[in-house]
Image (cartoon, grey):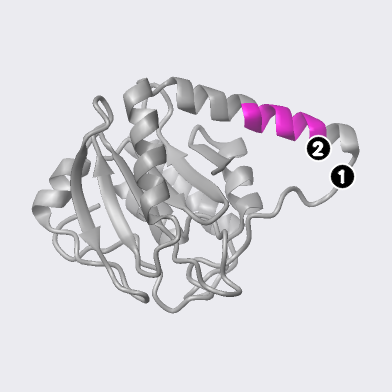
């Protein structure tokens, strides 16, 4: 998440760079949909239960404070205590610069940022830069909040090796559309998580 001015959580030039939707599955038999919902619910419980209650409360509280902001805001949360460690304020179209001091605080902790509530571009999932920044950095979890959802990438209990991180990025490139500003959807990240140990969830706010 690297260094000054990395700004990897920015989504300037919307729509497109983040793109996509938070829609559900793409069809199939009802039994298959039910199984997918059950698995997603289990993953949500596992993700929530792995964090201390004060941290869960902090994620909800801080997430709600920025959920409807017109400008992007990044908050770093201590994964053990839930304390706010850093905050980076962006603008309507751009994220703020991430200093080396803030990047250092991300190590082993949780990042949460909002996707601005813009007409026609609401409830979009985590972007390609979000995934890339997360896998190339050292945080435990990254969360994007929208008016309706919390989208999250998180490390599995044993973490991810450098080789696994490269493999996940390679698989992601094969799943998302090609182009400078690929449109990414919830279904694409769910598919990626199904093929790897990366944890991805979508939880209603």
Quarter of the view holding residue 156: top left
SS for tag 1? loop
* 79 in relation to 176, above or below: above
- Dominant SS type (magenta): helix
Q: Which residue is mark 1?
A: 28
Q: Where 52 sits versus 196, above or below?
A: above
Residue found farthest to the bottom: 13
Q: Position of residue 97 (x, y in %)?
A: 19, 65
Of the 4 image quadrants, the one containing the C terminus is top right
Helix, strand or loop at label 2? It is helix
Q: Do we see residue 160 in this rendering?
A: no
Counting from the top left corner in percent of width and height, residue 26 is at 78, 52
- Magenta span has 39? yes
Q: What span is in magenta?
A: 34-41
Give residue 33's mark: 2
Relative depth, front residue between 35 and 135: 35
Residue 34 position in % (x across, y down)? 80, 32
Specify few, some or many for label 2: CA neighbours under 10 Å numbering under 14, 14-19, or 20 or more: some
Is the residue under label 1 in contact with that under label 2 (CB below 8 Å)?
A: yes
At 32% from the left and 25% from the top, the residue drawn is 54
Crowding at label 1, few (<14), some or many (≥20) Cα neighbours within 10 Å? Answer: few
Of the pair 77 and 158, the residue shown nearer to us: 77
Q: Residue at x 56, y 67 (%)?
A: 19
Camera sees residue 192:
yes
State which tag comes first along the sequence, 2 or 1.
1
- Residue at figure coordinates x 87%, y 44% from the top left: 28
């Amino acid at each position: 998440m690297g260094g000054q001015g990395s700004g990897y959580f920015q989504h300037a030039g919307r729509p497109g760079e983040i793109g996509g939707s938070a829609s559900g599955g793409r069809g199939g038999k009802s039994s298959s949909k039910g199984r997918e919902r059950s698995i997603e619910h289990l993953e949500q419980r596992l993700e929530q239960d792995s964090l201390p209650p004060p941290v869960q409360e902090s994620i909800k509280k801080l997430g709600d404070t920025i959920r409807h902001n017109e400008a992007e805001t990044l908050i770093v949360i201590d994964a053990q205590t839930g304390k706010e460690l850093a905050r980076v304020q962006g603008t309507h179209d751009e994220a703020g610069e991430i200093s080396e001091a803030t990047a250092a605080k991300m190590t082993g902790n949780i990042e949460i940022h909002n996707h601005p509530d813009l007409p026609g571009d609401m409830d979009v999932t985590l972007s390609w830069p979000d995934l890339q920044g997360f896998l190339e950095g050292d945080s435990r979890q990254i969360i994007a909040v929208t008016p309706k959802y919390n989208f999250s990438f998180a490390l599995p209990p044993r973490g991810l090796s450098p080789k696994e991180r490269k493999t996940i990025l390679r698989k992601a490139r094969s799943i998302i559309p090609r182009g400078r500003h690929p449109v990414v959807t919830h279904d694409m990240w769910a598919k990626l998580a199904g093929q790897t140990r990366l944890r991805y969830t979508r939880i209603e706010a």
